[in-house]
Amino acid sequence: MSDEPTSVPPPAPARGLAGFWSRRSRNTKRRLVFYPSLAFLLILPLFFMMCMPGESYQGEAPVLDEKERALVGSLREDVTALAKTIGERNHPHPDALVRAREYVSGAFTQAGYQVHALDYVVLGSGLATNLEVELKGTRLPNEIVLVGAHYDSVEGSMGADDNASGVAGLLALARAFAGKPRARTLRFVAFADEEPPYFWNDAMGSLVYARACKKNGDDIVAMLSLETIGYYRVGPKTQHYPFPMGLFYPDHGDFIAFVGNLGSRGLTRDVVRIFREATRFPSEGVAAPNLIPGIGWSDQWSFWEVGYPGVMVTDTAPFRNPNYHTQGDTPETLDYDRFALVVSGVQKVVERLADR
């Protein structure tokens, strides 16, 4: 008999019903690990984009105080002047575009600012003008908090929400801060030519302006783009989103949204936190890649392009307002009480950003 150890053959694989349950058990274990891990990997980026500090205000809209009631009147007046008295304002309507520019410039001047008219040439369309006013900072004058809005409207629309509302908000903020310097420099800018066919190309007024700022070495620490901020609806299914955002946000259009890209996530979170701490008004925030529809649909995109942080303040435009880019975008469709509460809240955001 050999002294070598006898090798023991491996057990034969289980056959029949026993083998089936053994394989099924192994597959189940794999699924219990794989699918939760996959779900976690999918949800983690969404959590990163959508997680914002504080809680959105819930409850009835608060009663307006005396200042906010006065603000309702000035917002309505500015929107009506731009969207109804002047009307459609773009290069196919050059006289109206000039009148809109003069109206904004006159409002800045009346508030006590020196207006810088920054002209540039748009090939095939003629002259375009960005309008800039500035309140120099007392302690950190080289750091700039910029608030902007475009004053043109898309062809075929008088553009009450898009974007007379943003310009009215811009003028209200400029008036509120006039003669009251903060630690950082405050800059208010009305941009030309945001709408197609200039959107996202070299003739877009905010892109021309942002590139000039970068070339000058301006230290813009925060840019807020006021884009369609006057339209609100309370009922269910009045708010829509690009997929998959609708899985995580409310279906009623009574909130204001703060939208940044991933590079502006810190600023977006700061803006949302300050707004929620200071204002009793529903709010949502997101900092997401520009490939998601709507994320870069305004002048903050131009500042992202040259490396500045920027946040869009918006009622979400076509995801809520059925009148977007149509003849139905009229002053009568806006909710001026909620509009005033939003502008009042954004004022507090600008104060805090400018006093750091």
Image (spheres, rainbow, N blue to C red):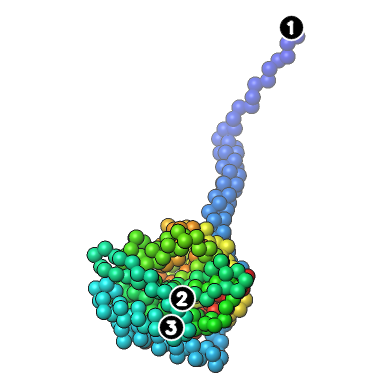
3 or 1: mark nearer the eye: 3
Q: Is residue 244 visible?
A: no
Q: Amino acid at mark 2?
A: Val
Relative to 191, 4 lies left or right? right
Question: Does the image show residue 188?
Answer: yes
Viewer-nearest residue: 116 or 144? 116
Q: What numbered label is drawn on residue 290? A: none
Q: Please name the residue shown 43% across and 83% down the image.
A: 109
- Residue at mark 2: 133
> On the image, numbered disc 3 is attached to which residue?
109
- All told, the count of numbered labels is 3
**Category of crowding for the residue at label 3, using alpha-carbon neighbours closer than 10 angstroms: few (below 14), some (14–19), many (at least 20):** some
Residue 286: percent from left, percent from top:
52, 65
- State how far apart marks 2 and 3 are (Cα): 9 Å
Q: Which mark is residue 1?
A: 1
x and y percentages locating residue 289 in the rendered image: 47, 58
Distance from disc 2 to disc 1, alpha carbons, whole Å, reads: 104 Å
Secondary structure at numbered mark 3: helix
Q: Quadrant of residue 84?
A: bottom left
Q: Are marks 2 and 3 in contact (CB under 8 Å)?
A: no
Question: Of circles 2 and 1, which is in front?
Answer: 2
Q: Describe the element under mark 2 as helix, strand or loop.
A: strand
Give the residue type at disc 3.
Answer: Thr
Q: Residues within 10 Å of mark 1 (few under 14, many from 20)?
A: few
Q: Residue at x 48, y 84 (%)?
A: 112
Alpha carbons under labels 3 and 1: distance apart: 112 Å
Q: Secondary structure at mark 1?
A: loop
What is the three-letter code of the residue carrying label 1? Answer: Met
The single residue placed furthest to the top in the displayed view is: 1
